[in-house]
Image (cartoon, helix red, strand yellow):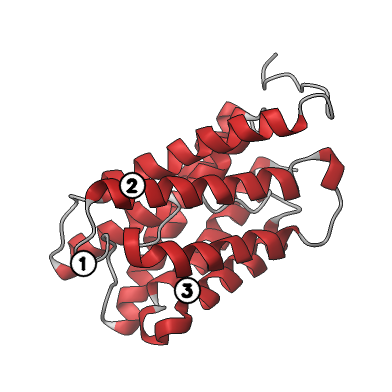
Amino acid sequence: MPQTSKLLTEFVGTFIFFSVIALSAPIGALAPLAIGTALMVMVYMGGHISGGHYNPAVSFGLFLRSKLSAPDLIGYWGAQLAGGILAFVFGYLVSGSTPGIHPGPGVNTPSALVVEIAFATALVLVVLNSAATKATQGNSFYGLAIGFTIVTAVFAGGPISGGAFNPAVGFSATLGGVLYAGQSWSDLWIYLVGGLIGSVIAAGIHAVQIAGIEPREPSPGE
């Protein structure tokens, strides 16, 4: 697949997915369902082209499992950040507000960080097993599994951590809050560190899960 096609898909899919996040506050209690559904349909839209990551943590997990090359990883991260930033600018321009992102009221930092790590791990692990493992290759349920992982994560963990589970969501939402709502950068590191640690944990679990089932694939460049 041409690199341009993959990066365009990551950019567009991230923009649409993140636009739903940026505009989801008025939806209220059902916002997690809208967010997870948006991810699901965008995964089906772009999965056959770029893999439908829309999340630097997912891309990093695939890189760690030798499913994505280093140049592709950097390109995907750039496309995801660009699409995410544009989505939160768009959300503000059409609604006049921006949600920002912070842990819930009264939640301490360690609790927020652990929740981000736990559900980022879950998401990356579901992606690796449903969309990047030979035993499940060609299935038609991968988008549903990935989308509903986020539905579950946002319902259960969102009130605690703020519910990013995606470093690009953390960065884009924080930037929107800083630019348009006078918020601060103080919690950004939770969403960056939490997502990437979750990727590492998920990649390690996946390696153990499929040991002896699938032959080790060479790392990109080997």
Q: Residue at x 45, y 53 (%)?
A: 165
Q: Residue at x 32, y 83 (%)?
A: 95
Q: Which residue is mark 3?
A: 20
Going from N to C along the chain, the mark reached first, 2 or 3, is: 3
Query: Relative to 208, is 46 above or below?
Result: below
Instruction: Note whether residue 57 is visible.
Output: yes
Q: Give the number of the disc on residue 105.
A: 1
Label 1: which secondary element: loop
- Determine crowd level at label 2: few under 14, some 14-19, many 20+ residues with C-alpha closer than 10 A: many
Quarter of the figure with residue 210 = top right
Mark 2 → mark 1, Cα distance in angstroms: 14 Å
On the rendered structure, is 188 left or right of 133?
left
Q: Nearer the viewer, mark 2 or mark 3?
A: 2
Q: Give the number of the disc on residue 113.
A: 2
Going from N to C along the chain, the mark reached first, 3 or 1, is: 3
Mark 2 → mark 3, Cα distance in angstroms: 24 Å
Quarter of the rendering occupied by the C terminus: top right
> Percent position (x, y) of residue 124?
58, 46
> Percent position (x, y) of residue 15?
49, 64
2 and 1 marks in contact (CB < 8 Å): no
- Determine crowd level at label 3: few under 14, some 14-19, many 20+ residues with C-alpha closer than 10 A: many
